[in-house]
Image (cartoon, rainbow, N blue to C red):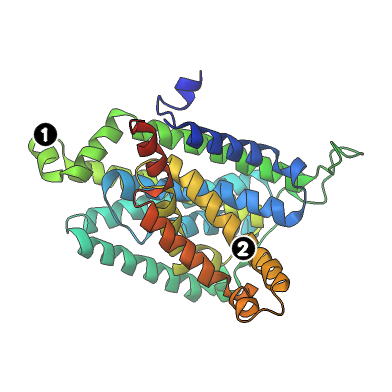
């Protein structure tokens, strides 16, 4: 059963297996072990970004395609469900219609972009995807009647998914179960299913061909594979997964805005998480996202405690001031890339295969 779920692709490292198991248990029990609003938001963000970063890894890690339009598809999924819920009301039908429309539009645009852009090579393709992403961001701001412009768009969910909904009179394991908890487990369950689906894809014959194209596309073409068709297919699949991640994030936040979806900072975060975790592994998305999101949310608090404890010492209070958290996060990233050039997962797997 476990072999079927993991598609035969086991972590191949005891340390990695333990880390992944801890992350899974953390996400599965977060509403009860960490019931605070901030802690629950961190767990939900991890779930969504695991799907988003893993879908980006399908392109870069398994096919060698560097795309800067990935955040655009994430935004399309988020705006699709937000606009539908805002215009049609907080119904399950509107939610399904918006999600399907967003995913379908993301796949269509991905197909057109890939059809046009994948005929060029390397940096030229990357720059074209960057241009498409920037154009979509500008379009979101221009269509303010539809998207809400700079202010974004807020919306309501069906009653059972709203925080005010209480299915039980008392607490469950000391925690008040409400609609927000239901939304969290919806996000968690869908994210887990999508992750396992992507794991299955990369371990299929299709995934093996993608890796052959990454290693040597001319040789793959020479032995009979139509590499352009495979690249277009994986672009469409990755766009669909990114749009699903956007839908989940919109449902969790009940809000969508340009800075949280289509901003260039979102694309940079995706790239950082993928590199830190390890490209071409899928499991790297889980590790990279968890480390990055936890650092982003709790590094400031940690630095604040260190700064207070170092009062009276020269330079240290200023050096560890919470406002400098980006400096320390950047330093952690540089060290991670230096000591783990193949990512954390790649390093753990290589250490596992090394003779004692």
Report the residue at 87% width, 37% height from top: 168
Looking at the rendering, which quadrant does residue 191 occupy?
A: top right
Does residue 91 lie above or below 11 as drawn? below
User: What residue is at 60 percent from the left and 55 percent from the top?
Assistant: 294
- Farthest residue to the left: give it: 222
Query: Mark 2 or mark 1, which is nearer to you?
Result: 2
Q: Secondary structure at mark 1?
A: loop
Q: Relative to residue 219, is residue 262 drawn left or right? A: right
Crowding at dot 2, Cα within 10 Å, few <14 / some 14-19 / many 20+, comes out as: some
Q: Which comes before the other along the chain, label 2 or label 1?
A: 1
Residue 325: which quarter of the image?
Answer: bottom right
Number of marks present in the image shown: 2
- Residue 172 horizontal/vertical position (percent): 85, 36
Residue 69 in percent (x, y) is at 37, 60
Give the Cα distance between marks 2 and 1. Answer: 51 Å
Q: Which residue is mark 1?
A: 224
324 w.r.t. 12: above or below: below
* Foreground of the two, 52 or 304: 304
Q: Which mark is residue 299?
A: 2
**Which residue is painted at 53% across and 34% down in the image?**
193
Query: Does the image show residue 258?
Result: no
Q: Residue 245: where, in percent of width, then height?
A: 52, 49
What crowding class fits label 1: few (fewer than 14 Cα within 10 Å), some (14-19), or many (20 or more)?
few
Front residue of this view, candidates 202 and 232: 202
Residue 18 picture quarter? top right
């Amino acid at each position: 059963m476990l072999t079927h779920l993991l598609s035969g692709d086991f972590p191949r490292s005891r340390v990695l297996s333990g880390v992944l198991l801890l992350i899974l248990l953390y996400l599965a029990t977060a509403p009860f072990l960490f019931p605070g609003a901030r802690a629950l938001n961190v767990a939900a963000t991890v779930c969504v970004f695991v799907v988003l970063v893993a879908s980006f890894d399908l392109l870069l890690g398994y096919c060698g395609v560097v795309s800067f339009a990935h955040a655009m598809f994430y935004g399309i999924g988020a705006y699709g469900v937000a606009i539908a819920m805002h215009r049609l009301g907080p119904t399950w039908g509107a939610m399904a219609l918006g999600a399907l429309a967003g995913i379908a539009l993301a796949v269509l645009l991905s197909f057109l972009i890939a059809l046009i852009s994948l005929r060029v090579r390397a940096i030229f393709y990357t720059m074209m995807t960057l241009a498409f992403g920037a154009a979509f961001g500008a379009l979101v701001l221009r269509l303010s009647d539809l998207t809400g412009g700079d202010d974004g768009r807020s919306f309501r969910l069906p009653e059972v998914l709203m925080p005010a909904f209480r299915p039980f009179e008392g607490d469950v394991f000391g925690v008040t179960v409400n609609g927000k908890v239901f939304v969290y487990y919806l996000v968690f369950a869908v994210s887990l299913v999508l992750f396992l689906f992507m794991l299955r894809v990369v371990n299929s014959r299709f995934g093996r061909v993608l890796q052959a194209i990454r290693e040597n596309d001319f040789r793959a073409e020479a032995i009979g594979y139509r590499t352009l068709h495979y690249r277009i297919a994986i672009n469409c699949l990755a766009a669909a997964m990114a749009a699903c991640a956007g839908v989940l994030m919109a449902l969790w936040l009940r809000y969508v805005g340009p800075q949280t979806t289509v901003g260039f900072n979102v694309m940079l975060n995706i790239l950082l998480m993928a590199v830190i975790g390890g490209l071409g592994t899928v499991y790297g998305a889980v590790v990279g996202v968890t480390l990055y999101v936890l650092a982003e949310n709790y590094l400031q608090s940690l630095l604040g405690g260190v700064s207070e404890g170092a009062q009276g010492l020269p330079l240290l209070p200023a050096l560890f001031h919470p406002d400098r958290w980006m400096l320390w996060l950047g330093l952690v990233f540089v060290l991670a890339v230096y000591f783990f050039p193949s990512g954390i997962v790649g390093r753990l797997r290589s250490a596992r295969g090394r003779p004692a």
